[in-house]
Image: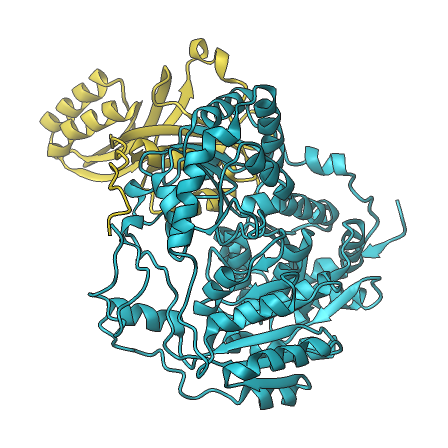
Chain colours: A cyan, B yellow
């Protein structure tokens, strides 16, 4: 027992105990006591300009570091502003702890000032949430929150603390790790993987002639890049990664097929379509990946490794489900394969040859120009200038897909984006969080002009905290992805997509105290990037004015089979004359 | 373009829609029921009935859910229920030997002696009980599985039902079938 402490001090004590080095947030009435305690806390407290940005920053921090991100806000609007951020983290299984103030207990249910049923609102978008009703429970609940957030399939956990509890004083003992585990009898994630199933999987891999590894975000969350690499090279299996799985396997590797699905490469989609064995590793058969479900890898047996049993056979029936932590399961699977090896190189010769033919036939490509800046060219130049070493955080839209396609990722936690929820405005604040978590890395936010402006206010945060992120705006003056769909599927009727009034982004950056640069010609792109790379004491915003009607291709239209992939549009770019495969 | 071989399509899993009875043991925290009903509502599953009550163990409540769906939907429901932090055990008892019980209170119009006699006869056949009497009504308490209660209601309907309240189904696996199931129910 220690001396009496406020609930607010207990919050800080638990954050210290959990090894937190940064929190993001914005104070208000119901959380003031906690902010008072944070004032003396031995870790960084980042004041943001909007709670949504705080949540994305904590999220970007978590994605880049693998640690739990922490966001702290007040009750009512402070907490409701977290909704999009929490849902974003929930869909991508990102470990976050959100601490929200609540009105004092005696006001709850009276429609008090800044009261909202935050537990009710956030229930379906958090892995779990708590309303603290007794200060006795506070230390344990906070520790449970961290434990639940980072273990099993990670996710955001919210703790709602009434103001009077943060003010109340008590003596307490910090719960031990064991006490935390034992206090959650219904929570026992399976991490080991069933040995019988692993044997079956190994057998399928030995027998397969056209296997493909389909690797998702779970491989990154489980820190299994090394195992993925080992398995792929051991059994000579080509690897396609999802948008969330980018970096779990080096894209510079000859076995890399790059991304699959709606905007997947021709060769990844062809390989998956023709495969006889699909090994899904921490991936969840999202509709953007599978397209028409009954034509997805139609001849393949499917092995599915996932820590969440609810992900297995959710949209597609699998042959060998393995519930467990990806890293653990892959290690065991590799061991199993090594015990009874096959002449892998010989066995895969034909398949890999076929894949190389596909790669040569339709590599990722775009029409180059020396008159107008092509968005893809900007991404390629960022890749060159950063030697492929930067962390890239993308918003949502066309630029996100180009950032996924034209930057070759080599490491886990190198490409951050809102894959599941598709949250516009995510890229920039997440980049700020990533840079704070990984000050050693160059961090680029690749944003669209539409996406960036959704969290533009937090340029002030980046300037105030001297976070030298590089913001590359792929500025086409459109909500480009919607425009592309309108062009393809709505007879080019551009309804509400033209952002004809936008701020002057250079002046905007300058007004915040950041550096603003602009490129309007292809010859200026490199110059602008080189200038940006020299600035290391504040954010720099680069406005790349690009070809307005460039499209993201290849594309499998939503709900269609891979057979109906659009590779290149005709001269007029009309949908009905699209070039369909098969 | 013919570098793609058109392959067969994946077979659609057979869809057999039927009623399932699922029992759930949960930590009796406030809000746990909201979590469960929210899970059903948010995913568009239709609950036929849901009952909840305490057990002999302090802090543990037991929920019985009757829900209709095909195998895949039911499997998802069970997995989603298991995923909740506060669930301790989820069991689909539909195909296990089990006991189902429901209680109904039914207020029936009784216009004359002949009707009263007839109702009393049905009450006796169904081993129900009259628990309240007024000048023009009987209130009947009946327990049994849902089919029995449905049958009783159908027979009693012509007399005129004034008011009715049902508890929803409670279910418990018969001990003889319970041996192998104690382990690994929440995986």
Percent across and percent down for residue A424 are 48, 68
- Of A189 and B123, nearer the camera is A189
Q: Is residue A34 rendered to the left or right of residue B133?
A: right
Percent across and percent down for residue A323 are 52, 31
Q: Is residue A250 visible?
A: yes
Q: Quadrant of residue A415?
A: bottom right
Percent across and percent down for residue A476 are 43, 79
Q: Establish if B10 lies above or below A374.
A: above
> Most extreme residue toward the top, as rendered?
B176
Percent across and percent down for residue B166 are 31, 34
Q: In the image, what residue occupies the spot 15% across and 29% down? A: B154
Q: Establish if A214 lies above or below A68.
A: above
- Of A92 and A481, nearer the camera is A481
- Of A265 and A160, nearer the camera is A265
Q: Quadrant of residue A71?
A: bottom right
Q: Is residue A281 rendered to the left or right of residue A3?
A: left
Q: Establish if A369 lies above or below A86.
A: below
Q: Establish if A413 lies above or below A278.
A: below
Q: Is residue B114 rendered to the left or right of residue A118?
A: left
Q: Quadrant of residue A177?
A: top right
Q: In the image, what residue occupies the spot 32% across and 34% down? A: A299
Q: Is residue A112 visible?
A: no
């Amino acid at each position: 027992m220690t001396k009496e402490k406020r609930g607010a001090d207990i919050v800080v004590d638990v954050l210290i105990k959990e090894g937190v080095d940064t929190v993001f947030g914005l104070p208000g009435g119901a959380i003031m006591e906690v902010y008072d305690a944070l004032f003396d806390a031995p870790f960084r407290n980042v004041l943001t300009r909007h709670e949504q940005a705080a949540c994305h920053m904590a999220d970007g921090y978590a994605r880049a570091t693998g640690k739990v991100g922490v966001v702290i806000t007040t009750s009512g609007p402070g907490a409701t502003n977290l909704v999009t951020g929490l849902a974003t983290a929930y869909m991508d299984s990102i470990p976050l702890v959100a601490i929200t103030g609540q009105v004092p207990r005696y006001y709850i249910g009276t429609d008090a000032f800044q009261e909202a049923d935050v537990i009710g609102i956030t229930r379906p978008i958090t892995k779990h949430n708590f309303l603290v009703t007794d200060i006795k429970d506070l230390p344990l609940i906070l520790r449970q929150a961290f434990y639940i957030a980072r273990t099993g399939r990670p996710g955001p956990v919210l703790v709602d603390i009434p103001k009077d509890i943060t003010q109340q004083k008590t003596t307490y003992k910090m719960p031990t790790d064991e006490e935390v585990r034992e206090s959650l009898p219904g929570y026992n994630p399976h991490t080991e993987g069933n040995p019988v199933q692993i044997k079956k999987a190994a057998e399928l891999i030995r027998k397969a002639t056209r296997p493909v590894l389909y690797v998702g975000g779970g491989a990154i969350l489980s820190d299994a890049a090394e195992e993925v690499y080992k398995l792929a090279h051991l059994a000579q299996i080509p690897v396609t990664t999802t948008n969330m799985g980018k970096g779990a396997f080096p894209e510079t590797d000859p076995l890399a097929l790059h991304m699959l699905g709606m905007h997947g490469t021709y060769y990844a989609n062809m390989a998956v379509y023709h495969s006889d064995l699909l090994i899904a590793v921490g991936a969840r058969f999202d509709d953007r990946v599978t397209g028409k479900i009954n034509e997805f890898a139609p001849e393949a047996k499917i092995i599915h490794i996932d820590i969440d049993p609810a992900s297995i056979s959710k949209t597609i029936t699998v042959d060998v489900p393995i519930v467990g932590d990806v890293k653990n399961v892959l290690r065991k699977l590799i061991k199993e394969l090594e015990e009874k090896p096959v002449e892998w190189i010989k066995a895969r010769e034909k398949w890999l040859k076929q894949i190389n033919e596909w790669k040569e036939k339709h590599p990722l490509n775009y029409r180059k120009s020396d008159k107008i800046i092509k968005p893809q060219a900007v991404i390629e130049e960022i890749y060159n200038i950063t030697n492929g070493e930067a962390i890239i955080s993308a918003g949502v839209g066309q630029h996100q897909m180009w950032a996924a396609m034209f930057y070759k990722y080599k490491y886990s936690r190198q490409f951050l984006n809102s894959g599941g929820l598709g949250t516009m405005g995510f890229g920039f604040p997440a980049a700020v969080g990533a840079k704070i978590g990984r000050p050693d890395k160059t961090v680029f936010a690749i944003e669209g002009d539409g996406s960036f402006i959704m969290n533009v206010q937090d340029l002030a945060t980046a300037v105030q905290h001297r976070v030298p992120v590089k913001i590359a705006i792929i500025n086409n003056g459109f909500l480009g992805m919607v425009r592309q769909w309108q062009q393809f599927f709505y007879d080019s009727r551009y309804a509400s997509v033209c952002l004809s009034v936008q701020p002057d982004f250079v002046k905007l950056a300058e007004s915040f105290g950041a550096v603003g640069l602009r490129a309007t010609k292809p010859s200026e792109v490199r110059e602008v990037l080189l200038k940006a790379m020299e600035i290391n004491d504040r954010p720099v915003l680069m406005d790349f004015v690009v070809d307005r009607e460039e499209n993201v291709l290849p594309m499998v239209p939503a709900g269609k089979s891979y057979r109906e992939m659009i590779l290149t549009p005709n001269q007029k770019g009309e949908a009905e004359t699209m070039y369909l495969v098969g | 373009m013919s570098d793609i071989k058109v392959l067969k399509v994946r077979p659609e899993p057979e869809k057999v829609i039927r009623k399932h009875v699922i029992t759930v043991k949960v930590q009796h925290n406030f809000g746990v029921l909201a979590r469960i009903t929210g899970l059903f509502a948010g995913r568009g599953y239709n609950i036929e009935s849901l009952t909840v009550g305490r057990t002999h163990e302090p802090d543990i409540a037991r929920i019985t859910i009757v829900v209709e769906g095909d195998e895949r939907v039911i499997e998802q429901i069970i997995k989603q229920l298991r995923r909740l932090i506060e669930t301790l055990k989820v069991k689909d008892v539909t195909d296990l030997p089990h006991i189902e019980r429901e209680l109904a209170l039914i207020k029936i119009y009784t216009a004359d002696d002949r009707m009263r006699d007839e109702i009393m006869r049905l009450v006796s056949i169904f081993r129900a009980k009259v628990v309240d009497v007024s000048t023009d009504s009987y209130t009947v308490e009946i327990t049994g599985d849902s089919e029995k209660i449905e049958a009783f209601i159908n027979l009693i309907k012509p007399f005129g039902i004034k008011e009715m309240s049902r508890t929803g189904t409670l279910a418990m696996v018969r001990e003889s079938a319970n041996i192998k199931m104690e382990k690994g129910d929440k995986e």
